[in-house]
Structure formats: structure tokens, C-alpha cells
Image (cartoon, rainbow, N blue to C red):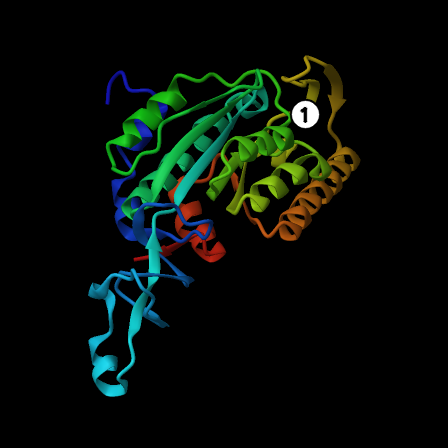
Amino acid sequence: MTGLGPARAAAARIGALASRLVLDVGGRMGPRPGERRFPGRPQPSGLELEAHTPYAPGDDLRHLDWNLLGRFDTLLMRRFTAEREVVVHLLVDASASMSAPAGDRKYAIAGELALGLAAIALASRHAVRLVVLRGDGSARATVVYRRRPGLVAMADLLDATVPAGAIALGAVLGEYAQRHPEGGAAIVISDFLLEADELEPGVAALRRRGYATALLRVLGRGEVDPSRVLATGELEDVETGLRHAVTLHADTLARYGELFAAHEGRLQASAVRQRAAWAGLVSDEPVDTFVTRDLVRLGLVRPR
């Protein structure tokens, strides 16, 4: 493993996870054949018979139901449940806040989670595109991959990106939905350190385009429990450069806990309104435990 970046090293560790789990996403069906079934969208061929329709001139006689013709002397065409590919878009926040607090490895953990989900998606015969949302307002994306070797390119993109700057996440998600109207599944990995009313329009835009949407929050331990990393000193907002003197005592910690819980509650309520899945991971917790416990409980993944 010498010389590998953290994402490349993570990509080499996740094979067992992908072999045990299936990514269970909804979303708009793509044009290519796949494994996800879409009842109510009958097509001429497939595995599961869904309906019959009267024969019309020009219909392919290979799909005529000859058994029913013999029984009822009626020309009926077989229609099967559509089985199509879903493209999974993994959108990873690479703003400066994902690199802080120091030592919490938020961005590295977000990348490991993204690669784990990419591996599970590919093993589930979905297609995957990884997108890094950068702090200068731009995004860098891989092509759409359908085979496991694509994980290397995804890992290289993550390793080549240094979190920096600030992004208006809601606006960025809205722009992404506008540029990619084909829909699919969108999994957004971020610390979501913004107000719910700023995030919600972007999630709503994804939903309008037919994306099944999941919001996965990655926070540092110090952001959840500041007493673990700071007693007195100075806090710096890495996105704005503003500094704030702080002394932590019982009242301050209690007030922080109240504000944190309220912020979390507003984000979760927003996710519920937009029918988006929501789950949170603290960066000192194992990613595989989060996937096999929390995301299974959420229904985003399931055992094979």
C-alpha cells in the first residue's frame, strides 16, 4: 500500500463490503438494461410478465402470446416488467469545512464512504458517477462507470482534491439537477453545515428531476462534542477566516448541544419533506459499521 493516497487505500479494502450488500435505490430508470424492476412500465421483453395488450399492425409477432391465441382466438401481445439500469450519482462536498476540525479526517471519511457505496452499487449492477463539489463553485466528475475497475479513477479524483473554499450547497445541487435532468439516484455526502432553508431548494430540484435522494452527514467528533477537543482558546471558521475567542464551561456546552440538536432537527425535517433519506456518521466511527448498521436500517442497502 506504500504511496497510495487515502482514497486509493480505502478502495483496496472494501471488496468484502460490496460482496455482502446490495444498494437498494429508487430513482428514474435509465435507457440501458439493468436489474432494477420498474412495474407499470411494460416493455416487449423481459423476465416477469406484467400485462397483455391487443395486437396492433406492426407489432413484433415474436411477442405474441400463442397460448392465449389458441385458448381465446385473440391476438394479444405479451408485455414484461421493465428492468433497467439506474445511474447512482455520488456527490461529495469538498469545501473547506470538510477538512476541519484538524485531525477529524472528515473529507477522508467522506471519500471512504463514497467509495464503499460506489463498490456496493457496482456490485449491485448499477452505474456510478462520482462528483466532487469544490469550494470554488465548480465540480469535477468521473465518467459513468459500470465495472469495478472504475473505483480506481474515483479514488484518484478524491485523492487529487484538497478541500478548500465555500460552497452554497443547495444552489450547487440545484445546478447539478439542471445539468443532469436524466435523474437516477443522488447520494450527497457532506457535513451540511448550512441552514435547512438553504439546502432544501437543491434537494427539491433533484427530486423534481426524478432522483431518489439520500443525504449522508459526516461530522468530526469535535463538532458533535467540542469538549473533546477544546477547553479554551480560539475557533476559526475555515471558510470565512473569522476567529472567535471561546471558553467552554457547562452552560456553554449545554447551549451548544441545544443549538446543535435544533439544527439537526431542521435538516432532518427538511429531508422528510423532500422524501430524502437521512443518516449521520461521526468521523471517528468505522465506515463499514455505519454502512452495515445505519444504512441497512435506513433501507439504502440490504444484505444479499
Residue 41: x %, y % from top left = 41, 60
Residue beneath disc 1: 231
Q: Residues within 10 Å of mark 1 (few under 14, many from 20)?
A: few
Residue 77: x %, y % from top left = 30, 70
Residue 183: x %, y % from top left = 48, 42
**Up/down of 108 relative to 274, above or below:** above
Residue 218: x %, y % from top left = 53, 36
The quadrant of the image that shows the N terminus is top left
In the image, 258 versus 27, the foreground residue is 27
Could you tell me which residue is drawn at 44 percent across and 36 percent down? 90
Could you tell me which residue is drawn at 75 percent across and 42 percent down? 258
Instruction: Tell me where residue 120 sits by quadrant.
Output: top left
Could you tell me which residue is drawn at 41 percent across and 49 percent down? 29
Residue 105 in sight here: no
The quadrant of the image that shows the C terminus is bottom left
As drawn, the residue found furthest toward the top would be 241
In the image, 86 versus 214, the foreground residue is 86
Q: Specify the amino acid type for callout 1.
A: Ala
**Up/down of 172 relative to 113, above or below:** above
